[in-house]
Image (cartoon, grey):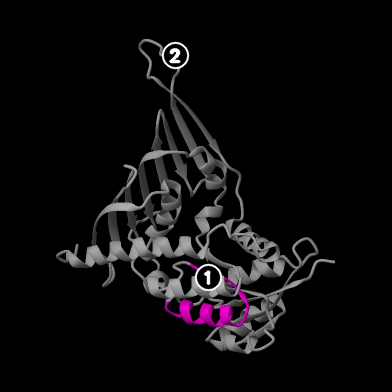
Amino acid sequence: MTKKLRAAVIGVGYLGRFHAQKYAALGGAEFGVELVGVVDAHAETAQRVAKELGVAAFSDYRELLGAQPAVDLVSVASTTETHHAVARDCLAAGVHVLAEKPITVTVAQADELIALADANKLILQVGHLERFNPAWLAVKDKIRRPVFIEAHRMAPFKARGIDVSVVLDLMIHDLDLILPLVGSPVADLRASGVSVLTDGIDIANARLEFGNGCVANLTASRTSTASLRRLRVFQHHEYISIDFGDRRIGISRKREALIEGEAPIDTETFQQPPGDALMTEIQAFVDAVRHGTRPVVSGREGRDALAVALEIDRMIAARPRQVT
């Protein structure tokens, strides 16, 4: 009989509550997961979610740890500045961790978590959700040697996201997708950004040149009136467009046989059915824990995306400040 894995969610605000719901839904025999508790610094929040799901509520995650931890795995969905301390304590106690993005506040903190997970032979996965978007899953293996990438990620303003810059809030999703896709170190980076609604950077643009010659141009904004999550990838004789919002994919290829008077391109478009990216992410985490396999988004990949995002923020901060 498969051992049931005991799970908890630390931080059950907007996103953490969804994590808890997914773990609770995995209570059947197929995945063998039992949600044993939820944790939040705000006791009322923890109690409300715990009552909804029929589990225990805690205001201090350390009550779940100790010489004999009460859990096998946790999602860390607390505020970004708490990720390092919470994940560190969990890993030190022998508990596998799925940390929401960004993995930590600094690269040094991320390196510490990676080293701790490796030393204790534990899974450290980072919650970059777009990796589990149905459109991305359908097309990622078709991208082989990109030469130019363009990403636009726009979102309406939300007060709950302003604890970090728009780069760490939104652009980091595209960095996470692009860095392993290109598979080459960043050779040159240029960035600019402006403040619109907050004291931080609300619109940012970055241009990355990679050692293999690929170029990526990324734009992110949290001042849009509508959401837009689109990635365009150009490679030899082919162009792939991915709309993460409506899961629509377009693939344009150079024709083998040219027809006089017609564009030398054949295009096909298709749309993936809706999926549950968060459930897929959590299932992947549970599977990695159960089988000891490499997580889809490793701690190192989360660290690499963070490192570039922080450098973009640093470059923007070094430029003369513009306020629109």
Considering only vertical position in the picture, is 170 above or below 264?
below
On the image, the x and y values in percent for residue 102 come to 44, 67
**Amino acid under disc 2:** Ala
Q: Nearer the viewer, residue 234 or 124?
A: 124
**Amino acid under disc 1:** Ala
Q: Which residue is mark 1?
A: 99
Q: Is residue 130 magenta?
A: no
Name the main secondary structure of what is drawn in magenta.
Answer: helix
On the image, the x and y values in percent for residue 136 come to 52, 47
Question: Which residue is rendered at x = 28% and y = 54% of the image?
Answer: 206
Other-residue count near label 1 (Cα within 10 Å), few / some / many at <14 / 14–19 / ≥20: many
For residue 301, side relative to residue 66 (left or right): left
Q: Secondary structure at mark 2?
A: loop
- Distance of mark 2 from mark 1, alpha carbons? 50 Å
Residue interval drawn in magenta: 81-100
Residue projecting furthest to the right: 1
Give yes or no for contact between labels 2 and 1 (Cβ–Cβ under 8 Å): no
Q: Earlier in the sequence, mark 2 or mark 1?
A: 1
Does residue 202 appear in this view?
A: no
Question: Which residue is rendered at x = 72% and y = 65% of the image?
Answer: 26
- Image quadrant occupied by the N terminus: bottom right
Q: Which residue is mark 2?
A: 257
Considering only vertical position in the picture, is 306 above or below 142?
below
